[in-house]
Amino acid sequence: MKKENSFSTKVSRFVSEINEDEWAKIMPPYPAGYGYFKTIDETLRQQFKTYYISIYDKDEISCIATCFIAEYSLDTTFGAKIKKITDKVLPLVRKILPNFLITRAIICGCPINRGMIGIKDSPCRDAVIETLITKMRSVGEKENASFIAFRDFAEEYTHILKPLLNSKFHKILSFPFAELKIEHKSFEDYFSSLSKATKIDLRRKFKKTEGKIKIDMEVVDNVDDFLDEIYDLYLQNIKKSDVTFEIITKDFFKAISRNAPGISKFFLWRIDGKLVAFHLCLVSGGILSGEYLGIDYGIAYDYHIYFVLMTDIIKWCIKNDIKSFDAGALSYDPKKRLDFQFVPQYLYVKHRNSIVNSLFRFVVPFLKPENSDPVLKSLKKEGKR
């Protein structure tokens, strides 16, 4: 443990090096907790190098920040038209310049989820954040990371992360996460709250399957017996996605059941016994967080599988007294129709070189999520984003 200013800091490589009781004491009560990060450490080491920074004030835990080192391609959030060009050109350019438009960064947050920091509410909180920045910079220097970033933090963290702006971080609107607040007593009550156009559209979609095929859903705690089927569906979904931040491993699906028992739930859909869709969710404290899904795209559009699985999960939430369905980022069009709200998230980023950092503001306009998503672009025009 190293002394920094009036605080002591400790850097751990794996979450297992942190006392679980200490974690529970300081971290926000969200389904993606200790076991979730343990799964990341165990199964995604090839993609992310994790660091956990703990800050103590007189031996009392004041902060735990989850960080990771990642290679980030700056073309990820380019507009669709530009990206079609870069997808063809970049492989050729990178034969000569392998790291063109790729930067290395130390990032505070979760590699595959919303950003969270465990921090004690005290008069010293700003100083704790400043200590965290200093420690991240130190780790970043050792890792040859050009950028320091805080990724995907919701509005509720704005006052906590205010010291970042004083340290010349750029604040950028990131991809929002979709949230459905469930205050309905029944699915019929929820359905009646939807717009007239959505109700007509959903009735038309579901009419295609009524009396013709039966789509069975079940919820299980692990998928060890059909892991290959699950992963194949997941990869189909990855291929369909315009924006991909990470590709998780097959072992992730196996390890999450072991590390987060009772929290990880696999929703499975079958037609005539054949697995056609799944959704891995984490459930805790009245919140269901949708993590990863996979769909058989050979039949997905014929039977509108995505709407089937989303409405089935909403029914399950209502039945099990779940108050919030957090459906993550991306796939905004169907979520908008199902009345999900888009909660803003922010990326705070700073280049370690002060000159480059001052010039980085000219790059920021090209990194806006609405550049790559038509729904977000329309919301921007309507002034709703």
Image (cartoon, grey):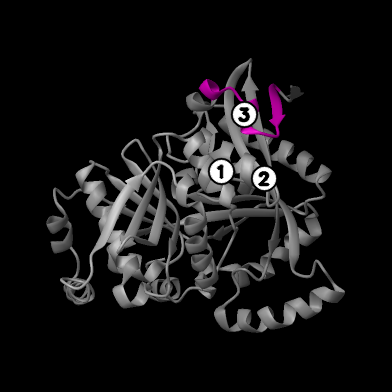
Q: Is residue 42 above or below residue 121?
A: below
Q: Quadrant of residue 187?
A: bottom left
Magenta residues, start to end: 6-22
Tell me: 216 left or right of 299: left
Asked whether 187 falls inside the magenta stretch, the response is no
Residue at image point 13% right, 63% down = 192
Residue at image point 63% right, 67% down = 364
Q: CA distance from mark 1 to mark 3?
A: 26 Å
**Residue 369 location in percent, x, y?**
53, 68
- Return the residue nearer the eye: 5 or 142: 142
- Return the residue nearer the eye: 383 or 142: 142
Q: Is residue 130 above or below residue 288?
A: above
**Residue 238 location in percent, x, y?**
53, 66
| Pointer 3 residue | 16
| Pointer 1 residue | 161
Q: CA distance from mark 2 to mark 1?
A: 18 Å
Check whether the beta carbons of the residues at disc 3 and disc 2 lie within 8 A of each other. no
Q: Is residue 367 above or below residue 105?
A: below
Going by the numbered disc 2, the residue's amino acid type is Phe
**Residue 35 location in percent, x, y?**
52, 35
Which quadrant would the N terminus be assigned to in this image? top right
Q: Earlier in the sequence, mark 3 or mark 2?
A: 3
Q: Quadrant of residue 384?
A: bottom left
Q: Secondary structure at mark 3?
A: helix
